[in-house]
C-alpha cells in the first residue's frame, strides 16, 4: 500500500491506502489545548453508573447494569491472519468484542445510550422523579414512563446508532423516531419496528438522512435530536470505553507503556465512536497507545479529511459512489466536530476493499467462532497494515454483530470463505 505520495489519486481509483499522521505533536500537548478533558469523560461514566440500577431492571442480561463487552485474547485469529496475508504480526492480538455488547449490539451503544440517559436524567430531575443520590431503578415505573412519553427522541442513522437510541429511548417510554439512510439493512429496521420505534426510510445517503431527521425535529420543542455529526454527549459516551478498556487490560495483566505499546484499530464512519475512544485512550495512555481508523475504500471520508487537512470534504470530491457492504461505515462526509478533536491525536488511517471485510469475517469465525458484522471485521486488518514490535498488544475493535440474523451471517461467511479459496 502506498503511504503518502499520490495517495489522493489512489483513493480516487478506489484503491486501499495507508496514511500515517507523521509529525503530530505529543498527545499530552494536543489534549491540553482541547476544550474537553478527562473530567468530561468521568462525568459521562458517573452518569452511566447512576443509571446502572435502571438498566439492570430493564435489561437483566447486563448483570450489574453496565453495558460492556469482553476483551478477548485471540491467538488463533492472529495465526489465521498471518497465514491468510502471508505476513507475521509482531506482538499479540486481542479483540474488544463490542460485537457482543448487550442491549444494542454495537460500539454506538455507549454514546447513544449516554445521550438518551442524559436527556432522561434532565427531564426526571425537572419533574421531581429523582433527586441527587436517588436509586434510578424508579425510572422504570409507569409514573416515569408517562412523563417520558410526552417527549420524543429522534436520530438519523445508517442502522446501529438508530438501534442504540431506539432501544434505550423506547425502554424509558420516550417516543422514538429513527430516520434511516438507504444503506440501513432491512433486518435492523424490522428489529426497531418490533420494539415500537418509528422508522422513517429515506432513499438518500447517511448525511441526508441526518439532515432530514434534524429538520423534522427542529420545529418541535418536545423533540430531542441526537446529532451524530455534532454531538459532544455522544462523543463522551464513546470515550468512557477507554476507562473500561484500561481496567480490562489491568485485569488481563497487560502493561501499556512506551516500550509496550497498545495499537488499537477502530472502524470509522462519521468518526464519533472511533474519535471518542481515541480521545479517551490518549487521555489515559498518552502516546503509549496508537489509534488507527479503518474505512471502506468507497466511504473513506475521515481518511480524506485527515490527508487533506480539512473536514470540508466528501467522497464525492474523489468521484466515489460511497456504497459499501459495511453499512455502519457508509458515510461520505465526516463529522467536522470530531475531525477537529482528533486530527492531531490519531496515529493514522487506512482503507480496505469490501471483499476484505468478508475475508476477515470468515477468518474470525473459522479461527475463534466469533461473529462480527462486515463493518466490524475491518478492524482485524489493523495488525497486518499498521505493524508494531514484539511487545505490541494489538486490539481490533469489533464494533458490531450481536443481532446479525443467522441466515444473513451464513451468507456472509460463505462469501468470505469463497474469497479465501476455501
Ligand atoms: C458496526 C459499526 N462500526 C463502526 C461504526 C463507526 O462509528 P462512527 O460512525 O461514529 O464513526 C459504526 C457506526 O454506525 C458501526 O455501526
Image (cartoon, grey):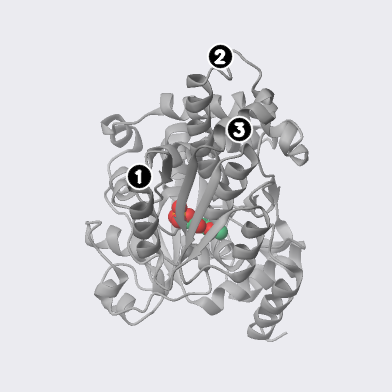
* Residue at the spot of label 2: 131
Q: Nearer the viewer, residue 1 or 417?
A: 417
Residue 8 seen in render: yes
Whole-Å distance between the Cαs marked 1 and 2? 38 Å
How far apart are the alpha carbons under marks 3 and 2? Answer: 18 Å
Which residue bears the numbered disc 1?
345
Mark 2 crowdedness (10 Å alpha carbons): few <14, some 14-19, many ≥20: few
Q: Residue shown at 77%/41% (left/top)?
A: 61
Q: Is mark 2 within 8 Å of ligand 1?
A: no
Inspect this view and state whether residue 392 appears. no
User: At which x and y percent is residue 241?
Assistant: 55, 39
N-term-proximal mark, 3 vs 2? 2
For the residues marked 1 and 3, what is the alpha-carbon distance in whole angstroms?
44 Å
- Label 1 sits on a secondary structure element that is loop
Q: 141 or 205: nearer the eye?
A: 141
On the image, which quarter does residue 320 sit in? bottom left
Amino acid at each position: 500500500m502506498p503511504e503518502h505520495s499520490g495517495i489522493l489519486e489512489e483513493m480516487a481509483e478506489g484503491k486501499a491506502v495507508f496514511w500515517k499522521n507523521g509529525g503530530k505533536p505529543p498527545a499530552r500537548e494536543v489534549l491540553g489545548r482541547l476544550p474537553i478533558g478527562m473530567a468530561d469523560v468521568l462525568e459521562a461514566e458517573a452518569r452511566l453508573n447512576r443509571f446502572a440500577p435502571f438498566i439492570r431492571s430493564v435489561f437483566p442480561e447486563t448483570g450489574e447494569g453496565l453495558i460492556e463487552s469482553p476483551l478477548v485474547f485471540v491467538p488463533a485469529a492472529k495465526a489465521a491472519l498471518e497465514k491468510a496475508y502471508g505476513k507475521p504480526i509482531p506482538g499479540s492480538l486481542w479483540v474488544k468484542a463490542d460485537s457482543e455488547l448487550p442491549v444494542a449490539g454495537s460500539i454506538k451503544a455507549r454514546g447513544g445510550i449516554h445521550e438518551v440517559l442524559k436527556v432522561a436524567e434532565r427531564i426526571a430531575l425537572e419533574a421531581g422523579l429523582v433527586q441527587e443520590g436517588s436509586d434510578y431503578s424508579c425510572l422504570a415505573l409507569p409514573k416515569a414512563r408517562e412523563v417520558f412519553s410526552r417527549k420524543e427522541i429522534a436520530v438519523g442513522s445508517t442502522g446501529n446508532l438508530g438501534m442504540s437510541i431506539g432501544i434505550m429511548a423506547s425502554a424509558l417510554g420516550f417516543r422514538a423516531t429513527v430516520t434511516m439512510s438507504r444503506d440501513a439493512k432491512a433486518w435492523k429496521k424490522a428489529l426497531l419496528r418490533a420494539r415500537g420505534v418509528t422508522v422513517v426510510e429515506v432513499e438518500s445517503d447517511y448525511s441526508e438522512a441526518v439532515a432530514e431527521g434534524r429538520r423534522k425535529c427542529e420545529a418541535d420543542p418536545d423533540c430531542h435530536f441526537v446529532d451524530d455529526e455534532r454531538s459532544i454527549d455522544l462523543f463522551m459516551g464513546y470515550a468512557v470505553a477507554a476507562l473500561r478498556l484500561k481496567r480490562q487490560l489491568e485485569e488481563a495483566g497487560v502493561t501499556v507503556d512506551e516500550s509496550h505499546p497498545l495499537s488499537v484499530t477502530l472502524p470509522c464512519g462519521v468518526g464519533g465512536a472511533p474519535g471518542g475512544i481515541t480521545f479517551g485512550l490518549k487521555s489515559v495512555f498518552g502516546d503509549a497507545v496508537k489509534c488507527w481508523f479503518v474505512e471502506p475504500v468507497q466511504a473513506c471520508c475521515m481518511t480524506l479529511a485527515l490527508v487533506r487537512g480539512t473536514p470540508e470534504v466528501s467522497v464525492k470530491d474523489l468521484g466515489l459512489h460511497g456504497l459499501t457492504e459495511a453499512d455502519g461505515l457508509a458515510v461520505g462526509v465526516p463529522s467536522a466536530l470530531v475531525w477537529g478533536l482528533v486530527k492531531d491525536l490519531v496515529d493514522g488511517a487506512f482503507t480496505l476493499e469490501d471483499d476484505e471485510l468478508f475475508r476477515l469475517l470468515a477468518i474470525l469465525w473459522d479461527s475463534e467462532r466469533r461473529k462480527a458484522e462486515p463493518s466490524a471485521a475491518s478492524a482485524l486488518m489493523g495488525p497486518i497494515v499498521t505493524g508494531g514490535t514484539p511487545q505490541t498488544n494489538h486490539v481490533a475493535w469489533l464494533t458490531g454483530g450481536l443481532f446479525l440474523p443467522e441466515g444473513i451471517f451464513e451468507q456472509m461467511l460463505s462469501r468470505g470463505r469463497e474469497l479465501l479459496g476455501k
